[in-house]
Image (spheres, rainbow, N blue to C red):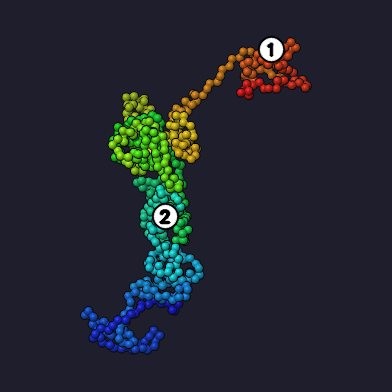
Amino acid sequence: MSKKDRVFKAEFTKELPEGVEIFSRNEKTKKGRPVIRWYGKWIENGKTVQYKLSPDRKKYLVETQKWYIDFKDHNQIRRCWPAFDDKKQSEALAGRIKELVCLKMARLAPDIELIKWLEVAPASIKKSLVRIGLLDSHRAAAGKSLLSHLEDFKGALQSKGNKDCRTNTAYSRIKKVFEGCKFNYYSEISGSAISKYIKTLREGEAPLSEKTSNYYLREIKQFCRWMIDDRRAIENPVEYLKPIRVTEEQERAALEPDEIAWLIYCTKTGQPIYRISGIERAALYVAAMYTGLRVSELRSLRVFSFDFEDKTVTVLRKNQKTTEEKLVLPLHPEVIEWLKPMFRGKSRDDVALKMPSEYNTAKMIRRDLANAREAWLKDAEQYPDLLKERTESDFLKSEKDNEEVVVFHSLRHTFSSIMAASGVHPKTAKELMRHKDINLTMKRYTHVFRGQESAAVESLPRIKKIEMKKQALATGTDGKTADPSLRICLCSDSQQASTTGDDGRQMNQSSGINNRVSNGPGVIRTLDQGIMSPLLYR
């Protein structure tokens, strides 16, 4: 700080009370010059107090409780601002202001230490710095709490046309990590702390998958990049973090037709799970298997979504432009038979299908599969060989021998596989699955049921048996007997017999064209230029 810049306490005057005793002292100024100062002394609240008097000795001087800062800004304008009650804090504030003045004059951005200080600085001081042009509004906004920044980030995503579900998911994930790490300001964000907390989420009671944990990291990095782009921060504290390597993801299985039958039969008579009766769960499984709707789509259905007369179900969803669109899908008679009795007594706006939370849908269907498998094994208790065979089988298991797993989304795989097994055209299946790429429908969602491969091979036509009427001669000039298989390829049934003409040449009975077998000079081996293979005439 220059000599003129200082931290001091201001003084103001008050009227002298009655009964004041005035006296003088010989003192020295800061420069050592002698001076006479007058004081007043009186009793106040039972205590003797003493104050310095004004030069006219009619009023006494009182120091302010706060300290003041006297400084010159980047425009060479002298400013006098109130600081804090504590002198050390006031001196520290004066030093920070001086740094900002120097950076502003040099046209440099604040360093990380200065940004950290701005985050915790009082709002009144930052407002004053913005008012005189010493700090821009974006830098001042950096002092807001992380939750305030997060709300602004959410608004930025929405302004770009992102879906509400996408925006809300990103917001909730980032907020969950920041609250778990107890971050309050942007400068407190630590990459190692975030990495450690995400690891605890993967190993918790409701563990995140490796893929989902990478999504958490992706959302946080996007938020930090937005902070820099919006000039609220100068560095990305999580830029160096890398996503973890995802092990090979388990494919979802499709239920076999026999597994579907056992699952529905045992579920409808089972005990409630997650406060959902057996008949309600069975109806839910039937609706999912015969419509191919996703969990979120099934959850959004209301009674008015179903039209049993037209045999359709209408799904409302938001597209990429965040506008609602209607999807009208056909209904299978099986779905109508299950749902129509259940809708009796319900209003149009009631929820159509009772479902557990999104975290328990897979647990629910796996519990029903386990109960169905137990009943299936019990059905073979009187037959030891059959029981042993069933015990070793993966029938109705949630984890198959081919490492595929059964979750609630497997019912959508089942829908696609049933269509393929029923002979539905792939293009039609793609439209019903609402996929953009038919490869996704055929490669990922369509499975081959047991026995389909054997049935496909058995359905191939047999080789036609051909009975030879007469042995053929060779087509060459060596006079050898031709191979019967060659004869089959080159001649039709009507051309299998040939005769010899009066001049010794071979003559075809069907065409009457003479064919020379000599290979002498200038002689054509086959006078009939048309190849006689019946395969090429088709």
Answer with mark 2 or mark 1, whichever residue precedes in sequence: 2
- Foreground residue among 512 and 274: 512
**Could you say where residue 268 lies in the image, as x and y percent from the top left?**
31, 33
- Foreground residue among 535 and 115: 535
Mark carried by residue 39: none
- Foreground residue among 39 and 349: 349
Residue 402 visible, this orientation: no
Q: Quadrant of the N terminus?
A: bottom left
Residue drawn at (45%, 77%) of the image: 2
Q: Secondary structure at mark 2?
A: helix
Residue drawn at (39%, 69%) of the image: 125
- Foreground residue among 162 and 62: 162
Residue to which mark 1 is pinned: 499
Q: Quadrant of residue 339?
A: top left
Q: CA distance from mark 2 to mark 1?
A: 94 Å
Query: Image height check: is 527 above or below 335?
Result: above
Residue to which mark 2 is pinned: 155
Residue projecting furthest to the top: 502
Q: Is residue 360 left or right of residue 422?
A: left
Query: Image height check: is 147 above or below 393?
Result: below
Amino acid beneath label 2:
Gly
Q: Secondary structure at mark 1?
A: strand
Amino acid beneath label 1:
Thr
**Could you say where residue 82 lies in the image, as x and y percent from the top left?**
37, 73
Q: Quadrant of the C terminus?
A: top right
